[in-house]
Amino acid sequence: MKKFIKTIGDIWSIDELRNKIILTLGLMAVYRFMAQVTLPGIDVTQLTALADQSKDNSLLGLLNAFTGGAFSKASIMALGIMPYISASIVVQLMGIAIPYLQKLQKEGESGRKKITQITRWLTIGIAVVQAPVYITNMKSILTDSAFLVDPTTFWFSSIILLTAGTVFAMWLGERITDKGIGNGISLLIMIGIIARFPMSFVQEYESRMASSNGGLIMLLLEVVVWLLVILVTILLVTAVRRIKVQYAKRAAAGSSSVQEVEGARQYIPLKLNSAGVMPIIFAQALMFIPTALASSVSDDYQTITRSLTDINGLGYNLLFALLIIIFSYFYTAITIPTNKMADDLKRSGGFIPGFTPGKETGDELDSILSKITFPGSIFLALLAILPSIANLFGMQQGWALFYGGTSLIIMVGVAIDTIQQINSYLLNSHYDSLMKTGVKRSSIA
């Protein structure tokens, strides 16, 4: 506890870091405030049906979790940051096939700025398409009395406001990334997920406190299991395989001059879960297809589609897990260019002991990556279906979502990334203070 308090004191004593954290918290508070603002022309007392739909549909429930409940509240931030996430994924995948984007990726900072601008415009385009879909869905769920203005006026104003809400969320995320601490887009998603935690826990508490439903002992057991799941998720996110790399000659700074160090060793860290949360998002999107087809297929196939739309059913979860494993390999293959890594290693004079630089090194990296991706994808699939397993033990749907899946992995990943950035500031501050006081390396060794 003393170490924790000292760390907080160190953080607060660094002006730049303190200002970044305050700015980040302030912008996240603005985002949460805007998420409570309902679209003009809607009777907020009749939004219960929209909230019920989000509970019953797994994909809509996921979107509602990402927006912190704004989706089910018909908020101006109902689309949240998801159009930007979709645009980023599209641009990343298109970068594999479109030469222009490949060229921009190689241009450094100027190319990155152009790609960011393309992503922004694509975000607006996706939001303009998704806004009418959201409004159509809302009109099919709510009664006509829930809409208080002329339909044409409501459509026009709502499309503009929903698109503007997404652009505003995108701007907040970019400001946090540039001026605050952590990845802004990821933090906005995380704060939306966490916003639903208190209500979900209270619902689970009330459910367990009901007669013959486990009581306080069962609730405490759930919390312990939840903490263990978080620990496993942290291990999954941070686990890496270190590939030893050796350099024939490396320059190293000595006490008085630059020296040549023979056989200097380093390593290439290959993550156990290089794809992150993207396989779950891709698989979740594909699992929405059986739901869309359920009403159009013949009676002979109704049993199959029904089993694939039941988020707690065996068929749904087996297919969901299989898709996650497949997409883990697919996304890892397109985002980790082992051949390029091998070429860069060769140009820098490095090699993996026992393998010749170039193609053989690239093949070895690809082989290792394929081997470690398999257990990583298995763990990821298990985490993804864990909420469904939690439901089988009588947990409430909202509380079960925190037991795994996209929500938990995003929270853990963002928390680790933010903590690492804060630690970097603390280390830099410590180094700067040593330089200012003129303490020699030998005196602190």
Image (cartoon, grey):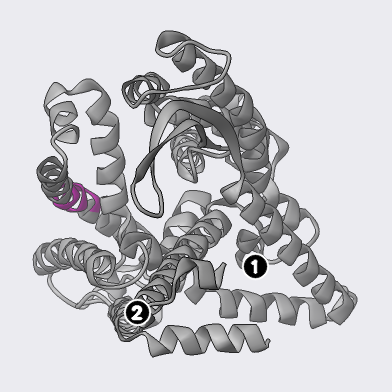
Q: Which residue is mark 2?
A: 17
Q: Nearer the viewer, residue 410 or 203?
A: 410
Q: Which residue is mark 1?
A: 399
Q: Is residue 50 above or below residue 304?
A: below
Q: Nearer the viewer, residue 105 or 147?
A: 105
Callout 1 secondary element: helix
Query: What's the magenta region?
Result: 123-130
At x 62%, y 63%, the residue is 402
At x 38%, y 60%, the residue is 186
Q: Is residue 283 left or right of residue 17?
A: right
On whether residue 125 falls in the magenta region, the answer is yes
Q: Is residue 320 above or below residue 149?
A: above
Give amino acid for label 2: Leu
Q: Earlier in the sequence, mark 2 or mark 1?
A: 2
The percent coordinates of residue 74 (x first, y second) are: 32, 70
Q: Is residue 184 above or below residue 319?
A: below
Give amino acid for label 1: Trp
How far is mark 2 from mark 1, CA to CA?
Answer: 34 Å
Q: Is residue 344 left or right of residue 265?
A: left
Disc 2 vs disc 1: Cβ atoms closer than 8 Å? no
**Residue 49 visible in the current orientation:** no
Q: Main secondary structure of the magenta part?
A: helix
Quarter of the figure that contains the N terminus: bottom right
Other residues around mark 1 within 10 Å, as few (<14) / some (14–19) / many (≥20) = many
The percent coordinates of residue 106 (x first, y second) are: 18, 32
Quarter of the figure that contains the C terminus: bottom right
